[in-house]
Amino acid sequence: MNCRVDPHSPVPPSQQLVACVLDAIASGELAAGDRLPSVRGLAAEALVNPNTVTKAYRDLEHLGATKGQNGSGVYVTDGGPEVARALRLAETLAAFETAAAHALRAGHEPDVLRRTLQVAAGTKGKVTT
Amino acid sequence: MNCRVDPHSPVPPSQQLVACVLDAIASGELAAGDRLPSVRGLAAEALVNPNTVTKAYRDLEHLGATKGQNGSGVYVTDGGPEVARALRLAETLAAFETAAAHALRAGHEPDVLRRTLQVAAGTKGKVTT
Amino acid sequence: MNCRVDPHSPVPPSQQLVACVLDAIASGELAAGDRLPSVRGLAAEALVNPNTVTKAYRDLEHLGATKGQNGSGVYVTDGGPEVARALRLAETLAAFETAAAHALRAGHEPDVLRRTLQVAAGTKGKVTT
Amino acid sequence: MNCRVDPHSPVPPSQQLVACVLDAIASGELAAGDRLPSVRGLAAEALVNPNTVTKAYRDLEHLGATKGQNGSGVYVTDGGPEVARALRLAETLAAFETAAAHALRAGHEPDVLRRTLQVAAGTKGKVTT
DNA sequence: GTGGTCTAGACCACA
DNA sequence: GTGGTCTAGACCACC
């Protein structure tokens, strides 16, 4: 999942995890029926307390994107991908637009941002060149 | 200055004020030596408690952008504009990176983001194709 | 730690707390990695408002002597002891200078002060005569 | 008078001025009947607002050390020297002792303090060697 | 008028 | 339990 949590961010860690998981579901990285990482595993990876992951999973379930099956783990629901896409696709694009606008207004050169984007896209970026 | 505070944002009001003032300094709206709005005045304008403005001003002073003068007001330091610009550059670039990461993770194609960036850059962004 | 706060002192309570904690760190009573007393606990002990302790802890963190860990407490940083010792040295020397200046200005003979200093230094202060 | 005011000190500027003037009277630098510096002059020298000097002079008069003669200036009263000595001699010596003790406990070498004292004593220090 | 500090009490999120 | 933030209202000292 590669979810990193920034403890200095004003957005609470649990919500950062929710957004991260929703992104993974929206992109298809996690499909309907797939099992989410274990609470302990994600907690170790994100360097947060397991309770925080538990809360994030509870929020995801409340959104209808996942469903915990007693004792066997947490799974993406059938409607999960749709929910995630509805919640995140438009939101992340809008956030990207405003972030780009802010960065440009602050004086960043478009080329710098383009290169930053390229790096973030990783290998996918190279292919599209 | 026109500082509005969104109480529903996860970003604490005091930090919103800090960002707002830094913007004003970075943009030249407040030059070195200029006096900031009074604590009570800005509090009334932003609809927050004066203590919240006090905290924001303390943070600004700690950043080196402003300096309080005993009973007379808070002023932009000589190095203030430079500090504000540097902070804004770093801040907006970091925000752009995370926004790009989230959008990519949510499944947006790099090309879509690149085109979005192009549009945001307006005429400055010449087509590199 | 035994931090007592004198509400009649011109030194603000929060700064008295800062000085008290720095003393504890500089003396080794609190080592790097140790946890500071809880905000509420120290507030009860020092008979001040928890917010006052919070402010003191924020100042300490800003000085680099401590670091707050989200929900778990405030801890002495690795460089904390060094920072605390450096601050105490500078602080006490400045206080000594001003006290000396005031005493001299009030009419005390330098010899009187020198002898007073000798006594305070105890056996360590060998007579240079 | 050579009164310097530290605006960063927690002790209010007006009280710093009171202490400074009392010290001058206690030492005999200002004798009974002598005129104090003008409000404006002392304000300019100490880099404070004239109102602050006015308040300090009011406090001094309230202590009985000085007396303002309408329009002609402020003068040391007959009992002024006695008042100043009663208030400041013991106090400054005690403050010197505690400052010395603190500095020594913080780790300063007695020799460093002795040299600092020498410097503060200026030419007087050389004579007493 | 100005900022600075404290108290008191509340809410939030993490451990 | 932990710290972090905000609100509300008060006092102080300087300009």
Image: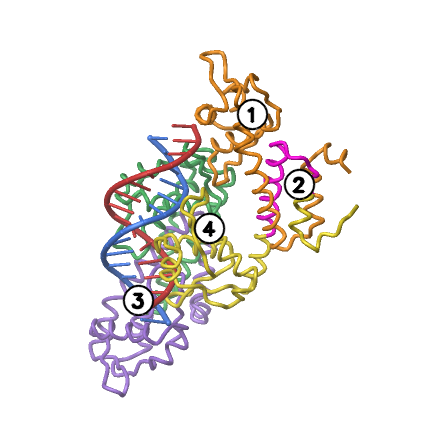
Chain colours: A purple, B green, C yellow, D orange, E blue, F red
Compared to residue D95, the image places residue C21 above or below, namely below
Whether tag 4 and tag 1 are in contact, CB under 8 A, the answer is no
User: How dense is the environment of label 1, judged by Cα within 10 Å: few (below 14), some, or many (20 and up)?
Assistant: many
Amino acid residing under circle 4: Gln
Q: Position of residue B2 (x, y in %)?
A: 31, 39
Where does the N terminus of chain D fall, quadrant-wise?
top right
Residue A68 occupies which quadrant of the picture? bottom left
Residue B22 seen in the current view: no
User: How dense is the environment of label 4, judged by Cα within 10 Å: few (below 14), some, or many (20 and up)?
Assistant: some
Whichever of labels 2 and 4 marks the residue nearer the N terminus, that label is 4
How far apart are the two marked residues, 3 and 2, measured between alpha carbons?
A: 63 Å
Residue under pointer 1: D81
Residue A54 occupies which quadrant of the picture? bottom left
How far apart are the two marked residues, 3 and 4, measured between alpha carbons?
A: 38 Å
Most foreground residue, C77 or A3: C77
Q: Which of marks 1 and 3 is in front?
A: 1
User: What subunit carries mark 1?
Assistant: D
Residue under pointer 2: C113
SS at circle 3: helix
Q: Which of marks 2 and 4 is in front?
A: 2
How far apart are the two marked residues, 4 and 1, measured between alpha carbons?
A: 34 Å
How far apart are the two marked residues, 1 and 2, measured between alpha carbons?
A: 21 Å
How far apart are the two marked residues, 2 and 4, measured between alpha carbons?
A: 27 Å
User: What subunit carries mark 3?
Assistant: A
Q: Residue A15 got which mark?
A: 3
Q: Does the magenta stretch include residue B73?
A: no
Q: Residue C16 got which mark?
A: 4
